[in-house]
Amino acid sequence: MPKEKGRSLIASNRKARHDYLIGDTFEAGIVLSGTEVKALRMGRASLVDGFAMFTGDELYLENVHIPEYLNGTWNNHAPRRKRKLLLHRAELEKIAHKTRESGRTIVPLALYFKDGRAKVEIAIATGKKEYDKRHALRERQDTREAQRAMAAANRRH
């Protein structure tokens, strides 16, 4: 069987980009059980409520929902268990240093297979205030309206 090449997206956390200002991003490996990998290959996962947290000097992904594998037996996994993230020590120290500042958290942005291995893209993020969210929505709406107006003007000529 040929090896997988490239990146195939399983789940993305679009809500994170709305709720947080995204800072540095990192690609981390993730420790999974066999039934979790099979459930991911079926394209089933949710990152919406997920976050990463240090336990000792190791980083764990928490509250990410990978549903039970349908054909699994008694050894199926728990859907919301803690999963260890695999990063280099220097990256872990950098993340730990940046999250010590107040208001910083670690959120997952995407879960995907890269060359056959499950990876998660995490980011150091700062929570947005409600007025920042409204401002971002207004900006997006204004640019969309401007593009529509430009397209309409181009069609007339």
Image: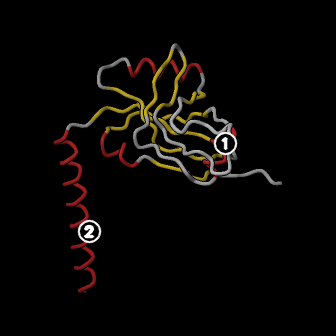
Q: Which residue is mark 2?
A: 147
Side of 6 where 25 appears, left or right: left
Q: What SS does tag 2 mark?
A: helix
Q: Residues within 10 Å of mark 2 (few under 14, many from 20)?
A: few
| In the rendered image, the vertical position of residue 60 relative to residue 128, given as above or below | above
Q: Quadrant of residue 149?
A: bottom left
Q: Quadrant of the C terminus?
A: bottom left
Disc 2 from disc 1: Cα separation: 46 Å
Q: Quadrant of the N terminus?
A: bottom right
Indicate the amino acid at tag 2: Gln
For the point 53% across and 32% down, the residue is: 81
> Looking at the rendered structure, which numbered label has been put on residue 73?
none
Residue at the top extreme of this rendering: 56
Residue at the left extreme of this rendering: 131
Indicate the amino acid at tag 1: Thr
Q: Which residue is mark 1?
A: 35
| In the rendered image, the vertical position of residue 81 relative to residue 90, given as above or below | below
Q: Quadrant of residue 17?
A: top left
| In the rendered image, the vertical position of residue 102 relative to residue 79, given as above or below | above
Question: In the image shown, does 10 or 4 lie closer to the viewer?
Answer: 10
| In the rendered image, the vertical position of residue 20 relative to residue 94, given as above or below | below
For the point 41% across and 43% down, the residue is: 48
Question: In the image shown, does 9 or 72 lie closer to the viewer?
Answer: 72
Side of 106 where 150 appears, left or right: left
